[in-house]
Image (cartoon, rainbow, N blue to C red):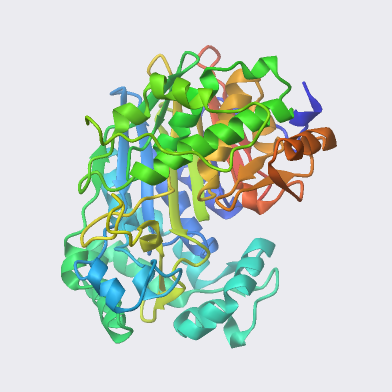
């Protein structure tokens, strides 16, 4: 196997169950649930709840949630969309009156209704075997008694220090004494612990129809926000059919819009036209093809992905193999394009957590949950310890765009879990945090696993690239120098970054060998992802 696939960790193998998550305390909590007889849905949510405490800059009860759930006995694959909508008062005119030309990065006007709580409850009611009250007992001690602060949390706190201090409650919680805590110092969140106890007693209604939601509305009104109790009471989750495409005998499944998952499938359709194995895995030829395919997928994503309940998304045409062939013809093998134009279908027609679980009965879950950017809006509800996400940033304020801000509308979402099926059953579960980088990391994982036959750990640790909206191409310094030079010669604006940099995500993979029954897992060392199996 190429040096490209050298690893620092081995692939983990087991025969009964397997779980991966973005923090060791979270993966341990999920494993404990599996050991106690819980199923994959229970374990995923237990791990997610711990993550809301120990990765407070990336996820939380003030964020959104997407899940793919395969139930082995029924042979079903369900997609749960638990993303929230804009408040009823959040109109385009209201934002213009406030002087906004785009949705602000932080503050109360960057917020939509948090959807994760309702999502956890919906998943447990439909497919779980335990209640939210039982699973919250895994998270509360880390909020009440604390968890050790780690380096990338310190970095996030330094980045957002001024905003958190300006908020007041967030600064008091995360920056005690106004200072960034040291690595190893315990971080406690007593107000969050009390909120979790309220959820144990009353479930999500404690927020959507109770005191915790009233606290959000009161705080929103006090700082000029748009939230009302009606917005919270009206929140609903949606069970939808996954969006799929075929790739070399496998079925790739992910979330339909308002998720960006379609961009992953478009990239796969373009890659399938070529034979990556005929090229070197770390060659400029292959990376150039992948980067240009990403640009073509993203220009269509940015033009059309929105809330389909408000504006139709041309899903079938975006996923057509004919469009993929037409797009590939636009790629100059010797020159990077500054940009591409989206096909006109009107005629005729960054921070996040990820986890995945397979249980002893063959049920499989992929879950992704987020505050969007570091500490989301940087607004904490003082009485409850809830940090609000900044998902309204997914909207545009361009009135002619399908994704324009509107009351009771869901924004474009970067979140998209992915599952790869073979003969209708899960074969590979994969995903990563990383905002715009999510589909880019996922297509690299898919290619490495399916085309180059890498094992899960090799795919997770392989050198990674990321193409940014500003035209830059980030490349880890483990790529050959000749590859980097050749890409520069093709016109790519390459920026070389550290060999295992956090900006490349925190990917995780579980592969299911149907012949032997062996589960194989890999977890990304770029952040704190780990796997546990039995």
On-image quarter of the C terminus: top right
**Residue sitting at x 75%, y 40%:** 488
Residue drawn at point x = 31 percent, y = 57 percent: 115
Front-lying residue, 429 or 20:
429
In the shown orientation, is residue 439 left or right of residue 489?
A: left
- Return the x and y of residue 56 as percentages of the image width and height: 51, 65
Residue 131 visible at all:
no
Quadrant for the N terminus in the image: top right
**Vertically, is 328 above or below 34?**
above
The residue at the point 66 percent across, 41 percent down is 465
Side of 118 where 105 appears, left or right: right
Front position in the image: 63 or 210? 63
Asked if residue 14 is positioned above or below residue 122 in the image, the reply reads above
In the figure, residue 7 lies in which quadrant? Answer: top right
| Quarter of the view holding residue 335 | top right
The x and y percentages for residue 101 are 38, 69
- Residue 524 shows in this picture: yes
Q: Position of residue 74 (x, y in %)?
A: 28, 23
Marks counted in the figure total 0
Q: Residue furthest right?
A: 481
**Residue 458 rendering spot, x and y as whole percentages:** 69, 31
Q: Is residue 114 above or below residue 510?
A: below
Q: Residue at x 65, y 53 (%)?
A: 502
Work out whether residue 255 or residue 31 is closer to the camera in this orientation and state it: 255
Query: Foreground residue, 299 or 64?
Result: 299
Task: Tell me: residue 226, above or below residue 246.
Answer: below
């Amino acid at each position: 196997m190429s040096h490209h696939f050298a690893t620092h960790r081995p692939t983990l193998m087991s025969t009964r169950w397997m779980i991966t998550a973005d923090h060791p305390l979270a993966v341990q909590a999920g494993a404990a649930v599996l050991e106690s007889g819980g199923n994959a849905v229970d374990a995923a949510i237990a791990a997610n709840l711990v993550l809301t405490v120990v990765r407070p800059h990336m996820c939380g009860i003030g964020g959104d949630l997407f899940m793919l759930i395969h139930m082995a006995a029924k042979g079903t694959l369900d997609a749960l969309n638990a993303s929230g909508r804009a408040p009823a008062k959040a109109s385009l005119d209201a934002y213009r009156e406030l002087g906004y030309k785009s949705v602000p990065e932080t503050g109360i006007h960057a917020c939509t209704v948090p959807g994760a709580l309702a999502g956890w409850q919906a998943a447990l009611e439909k497919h779980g075997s335990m209640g939210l009250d039982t699973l919250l007992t895994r998270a509360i001690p880390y909020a009440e008694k604390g968890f050790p602060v780690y380096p990338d949390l310190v970095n996030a706190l330094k980045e957002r220090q001024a905003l958190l201090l300006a908020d007041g409650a967030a600064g008091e919680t995360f920056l005690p004494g106004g200072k960034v805590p040291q690595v190893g110092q315990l971080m406690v969140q007593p107000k969050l612990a009390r909120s979790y106890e309220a959820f144990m007693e009353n479930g999500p209604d404690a927020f959507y129809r109770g005191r915790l939601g009233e606290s959000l509305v009161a705080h929103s009104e006090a700082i000029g926000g748009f939230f009302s109790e009606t917005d919270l009471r009206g929140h609903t989750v949606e069970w939808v059919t996954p969006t799929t495409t075929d790739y070399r005998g496998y079925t790739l499944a992910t979330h339909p819009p308002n998720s960006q998952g379609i961009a992953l499938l478009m990239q796969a359709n373009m890659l399938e036209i070529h034979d990556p194995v005929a090229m070197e895995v770390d060659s400029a030829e292959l990376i150039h093809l992948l980067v240009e395919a990403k640009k073509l997928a993203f220009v269509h994503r940015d033009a059309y992905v929105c809330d389909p309940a408000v504006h139709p998304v041309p899903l079938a045409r975006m996923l057509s193999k004919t469009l993929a062939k037409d797009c590939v013809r636009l790629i100059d093998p010797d020159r990077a394009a500054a940009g591409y134009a989206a096909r006109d279908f009107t005629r005729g027609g960054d921070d996040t957590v990820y986890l995945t679980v397979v249980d002893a009965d063959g049920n499989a879950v992929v879950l992704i949950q987020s505050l969007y950017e570091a500490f989301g809006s940087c607004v904490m509800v003082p009485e409850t310890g809830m940090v609000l996400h900044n998902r309204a940033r997914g909207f545009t304020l361009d009135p002619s765009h399908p994704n324009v801000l509107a009351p009771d509308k869901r924004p474009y979402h970067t979140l998209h879990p992915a599952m790869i099926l073979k003969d209708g059953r899960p074969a590979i579960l994969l995903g990563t945090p990383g905002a715009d980088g999510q589909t880019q990391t996922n297509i690299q994982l898919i290619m490495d696993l399916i085309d180059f036959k890498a094992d899960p750990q090799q795919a997770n640790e392989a050198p990674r690239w990321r193409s940014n909206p500003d035209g830059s191409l980030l490349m880890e310094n483990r790529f050959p120098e000749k590859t980097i030079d050749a890409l520069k010669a093709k016109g790519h604006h390459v920026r070389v970054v550290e060999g295992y940099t956090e900006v490349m995500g925190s990917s995780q993979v579980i592969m299911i060998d149907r012949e032997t029954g062996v589960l194989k897992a890999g977890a990304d060392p770029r952040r704190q992802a780990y796997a546990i199996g039995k």
